[in-house]
Each structure stands twice: as C-alpha cells, then as structure tokens.
Amino acid sequence: MYALQVMPISTLFPDYKDAFTPCRPFPSRESAISWLQMIGRENKFVLVTKHSDAGRIKRRGRVKLACERSGTYRGISQRVGKGKAAKIALKPRTEEEEETGGLKSGTKKCGCPFLINIKENVDSLWYVTVICGRHNHDPAKSLDDHSFAGRLDKGEQVVVVQMTKGNVKPRDILNTLKQRDVKR
Ligand SMILES: [Zn+2]
C-alpha cells in the first residue's frame, strides 16, 4: 500500500480509457458487454459483470463491468458480529490457501479499480462510460486459463467488431458466425 502512495497508479499503469470508449452506443446490453470483453481480451484483461439491473418499466437497465482482479480475496476477511457492531476480521487461511498463496480460483484479486458503466438511455441504446481506465497490475501474460479465451479465432473477432460497430443484434452476429462455420 505504501509503495502505491509514493508512486501514483497513473505513473505505473496506462489508462485504457480510449480503448474502451466506443464511437457509438450499442443496441443491446449483450452487444455492449461482448464488445468491451473483446477489447479486454485484446489487452489481456478479463472483465466481469459486477452489478446488473435489468431495468423495469421506469428504470433503465445498467451494468457495471469490472476487472476480474477487482475486490479482495474473499477468504482473507470475514464478517464478525451483526448489524452496526459487525467487524471485518482476518480469517485464518486453510492449508490449501496457504499452499497456493490464497489463490483458489487462480484469480489474484488485488483491488483493481478498473470500472466501466453501461447504461440504457431513454433512446433504448446502451451507453458506455469508462469510470476508471486504469488497472493496478500488469496485463495477463496469457489468457489460456480462461474458458472463453481462444473461442473466437481472429477472423471471427473481426466479424464481431464490424458487426457491433454497425449496430447488429447479437443474435444476427451468432447466425453470421454459424453460417461462416458451415461454409468452411
Ligand atoms: Zn485490473
């Protein structure tokens, strides 16, 4: 923590704000999320959905996308007591956590501040706002460990980018990819 105070995050890690700012809003929540996650993959960061509000009659939908390394490792602290008297206490690590350095899922949480807001507007389009474009850690060396990585080849990624930029519905994107597979 002390090191981060001496060296501000801005001098240590680049701001990805521009990369994650699309030139236009998206037609759906899904197309916005998949586009952002794809940009994440290109930069070797995995983005996860943090909070999601489906949007009711008057309320518009909103989603928060964060880095998978946001938050702190759950096993380290625990809630003790109830209500206002509750405290967060350190929890002794299990043997397994001790061996792996507290990494159960292979994801090292380090309180990464990277955060993106996706909000549905009155025009029913989904607008992306980068709240924090900086990570507090280096990009992953490889995303091989992640189930979705490598699912799309380079050609397919280009198709998805072109189609999301052209405001095509996710279902149509899927259909086009399926048709491409048949043609091969
Ligand atoms: Zn991060």
Image (cartoon, helix red, strand yellow):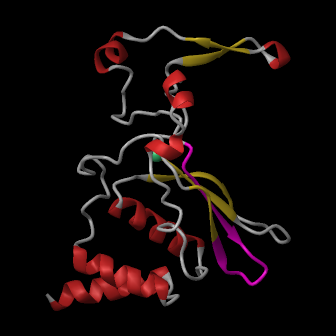
The residue that appears at 58% across and 79% down in the rendered structure is 26
The answer to whether 35 appears left or right of 124 in the picture is left
Expressed as whole percent of the image width and height from the top left, the position of residue 126 reads 65, 75
- Asked if residue 144 is positioned above or below residue 163 in the image, the reply reads above
Q: Tell me where the magenta segment starts and ends, as one range.
A: 113-127
Expressed as whole percent of the image width and height from the top left, the position of residue 71 reads 55, 35
The residue that appears at 32% across and 58% down in the rendered structure is 148
Expressed as whole percent of the image width and height from the top left, the position of residue 141 reads 25, 47
Is 180 or 103 nearer to us in this picture? 103
Residue 68 makes an appearance in the image: no
The residue that appears at 47% across and 68% down in the rendered structure is 19
Residue 161 makes an appearance in the image: yes
The residue that appears at 34% across and 10% down in the rendered structure is 95
Q: Is residue 151 magenta?
A: no
Expressed as whole percent of the image width and height from the top left, the position of residue 152 reads 27, 70
Is 160 or 178 nearer to us in this picture? 160
Q: Is residue 123 magenta?
A: yes
Quarter of the view holding residue 151: bottom left
Q: Residue furthest left?
A: 184
- Asked if residue 136 is positioned above or below residue 34 in the image, the reply reads above
- Asked if residue 60 is positioned above or below residue 10 in the image, the reply reads below
The answer to whether 3 appears left or right of 62 in the picture is left
- Asked if residue 92 is positioned above or below residue 84 in the image, the reply reads above
Name the quadrant of the C terminus. Answer: bottom left
